Image (cartoon, rainbow, N blue to C red):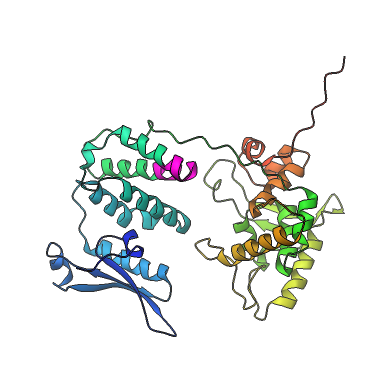
Amino acid sequence: MVKRSTQNKQYPKGWRVRRRGTKWAKFVISFYTTSVNAHLWDNKKEVQLGSGLTLAEAEQQAYKLWVDKIVTTDKPFTLQDLFDRYELQVIPKKAAATQKSNRQSLKRLRNVFDLKQPVIDFKTHQAYQYRDYVSNNLSAKRANLDVEVLSHLFTKAIEWGCNIQHPVKGIVGKISIPDRDRYVEDEELKEFLSVCNAMQKVYIPLKLATGKDKSMLLRIKLGDITSEGIKFPKRQKTAGKKGGKSSIVPFEHQGESTGLKEIIDDIMSWRKRWCKVQSFYLFASSMGQPLITDQGITSNFDSQWQRTMKKALQTTSLDERFTEHDLKAKTASDLEDAEHASKLLQHHSTATTKRIYRRKPEIVLPFKR
């Protein structure tokens, strides 16, 4: 019996992840069979499920083969059965960032609940106790994420044939978290820009001018820049809603420059100096690779941001950290008209803009007798 490492505990029982090779090491995921399921694997003791240069590639192969082999037509009896089936069939169909978050939630759920407990015996008070425990010992945000996964688990359990009343949905609510209110002052931004690298110095003006999400800015291709301005697609969160639209941020309005063309010219000058290999993307690495993956991962960009923020806190008068996303709120706050801010940020309504992104204190005149 192979003892499970901490890394392997996030996977189904019997899985093992290893690195093989030296210079071009590969991630290899294997499965140690038991007498119960050995017939599905030609009675082999160890079976390779997947391999790849990245862990994500190996996981993708492994889950595909795993789902094809393991028969899960019967309704889940225990929480262990429910958790395993959810991880195999439901999570892989979600976006990469959501998959990562769901697996972290599932790992926490596995560590707390009795996996041998029958699904039909799960009680609502257990969900309340778990939510409050995670909120008090970790964070309210993690508690809410876990409750969301727990609720979906039992929704799928009902779908898969479990004759139960839903113990979470519509009963166990999320913990209220105050909206972020960090507003970046002009002087703070000036201090941060003083230690930014060349890419950040041309990226931040575009961020402030357009108010777009990081994922949208890093996905801009040269073909999206026309003689009129920059074309942006629908935001993913509003694409399926009535009113969600694509947009064009123009270079000129009513015969006057909006300042956007000058920002793009600066970015193109940076590209000319930086990119050794041409790229279709406006922002790219020196070898022409985009700074965002197909799954929306921006680790290169995020690492640069964290290094610059650390340097700014250590060497300038900046004394409070802010995020890249806070700059979106700065744009929404600095615009005088909330309706204009909402359209620029491509929100479905002004309610979201006002509640989350309009962070600058309002000037309210006193009552004059």
Please give left or right for residue 252 compared with residue 328 in the image: right
The spot of residue 358 in percent (x, y) is 69, 39
Whole-percent x, y for residue 289 in the image? 59, 73
Residue 254 drawn above or below residue 304: above
Image position of 256 (left or right of 309): right
Q: Quadrant of the C terminus?
A: top right
Tell which residue pokes out farthest to the top in this image: 369
| On-image quarter of the N terminus | bottom left
Q: Which residues are magenta?
A: 134-148
Q: Main secondary structure of the magenta part?
A: helix
Residue 93 against residue 146 in the figure, above or below: below
The reply to whether the magenta stretch includes residue 305 is no
Front-most of residues 146 and 87: 146
Residue depicted at 72% across the width and 60% down the height: 312
Q: Nearer the viewer, residue 253 or 24?
A: 24
Residue 29 % position (x, y): 32, 71
Res 229 seen here: no
Image coordinates of residue 151 in percent, x first then y, are 36, 40
Vertical order, 253 against 349 (above or below): below
Q: Residue at x 59, y 45 (%)?
A: 244
Query: Who's the residue at 67% across and 44% down the image?
Result: 182
Does 181 sit above or below residue 58?
above
